[in-house]
Image: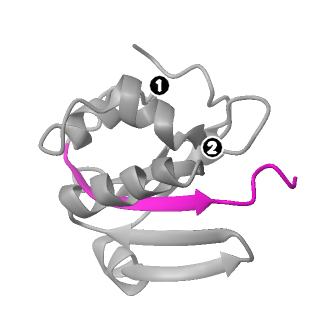
Amino acid sequence: MANDYLEDEAAVEEMHREDFNKLLGSRELSPGVTEHVTYSNSEAYNIIRDAAEHDARVVISMRDDASDTKIEIFANEGHSVGASASWLMDEVIGSRSSIAEDIAAYSHYGEITDPDGWLIEVHTNWREG
């Protein structure tokens, strides 16, 4: 099932491993918006699950090692930023072990050859904007 949400080529950016490594960890980008950067599928699953428990929305990008690119998968559904974390948990993600394949299937840029990293923005203030 292809993602109809992304219309613009800016959703694909060059992202070398060295640049990704500099971003690892969690940081507050602005009040109510936290960015999490990890290589771990299990950690990404936990971040999204926690966001779902707090009725948050998430903007998800994956780093593709084969092409050294960062590809936004869920950025905007046309009304609020990102995707509903609870929708992702209920409808998209099959399990902790299949999260990379399940999320990558939503990229409309074709197959993500070698997903190896996650950039996840958690928006807890999405109702305010």
Give the x, y percent position of residue 51.
49, 55
**Residue found farthest to the top:** 1
Give the x, y percent position of residue 83.
58, 38
**Residue found farthest to the front:** 53
Drawn side of residue 75 relative to residue 42, left or right? right
Relative to the observer, which residue lies in front, 107 or 103?
103
Give the x, y percent position of residue 12.
52, 47
Identify which amino acid the numbered label 2 is placed on: Gly
Q: Which residues are magenta?
A: 114-129
Q: Secondary structure at mark 2?
A: loop
x 50%, y 43%: residue? 85
Q: Which residue is mark 1?
A: 108
Identify which amino acid the numbered label 1 is placed on: His
Image vertical order of residue 89 relative to residue 115, above or below: above
Question: The N terminus appears in which quarter of the rendering?
Answer: top left
Drawn side of residue 55 relative to residue 95, left or right? right
Give the x, y percent position of residue 126.
75, 52
Distance CA(mark 2)–CA(mark 1): 15 Å
x 58%, y 71%: residue? 34
Which quarter of the figure has residue 43?
bottom left
Q: Nearer the viewer, mark 2 or mark 1?
A: 2
Q: Which residue is mark 2?
A: 82
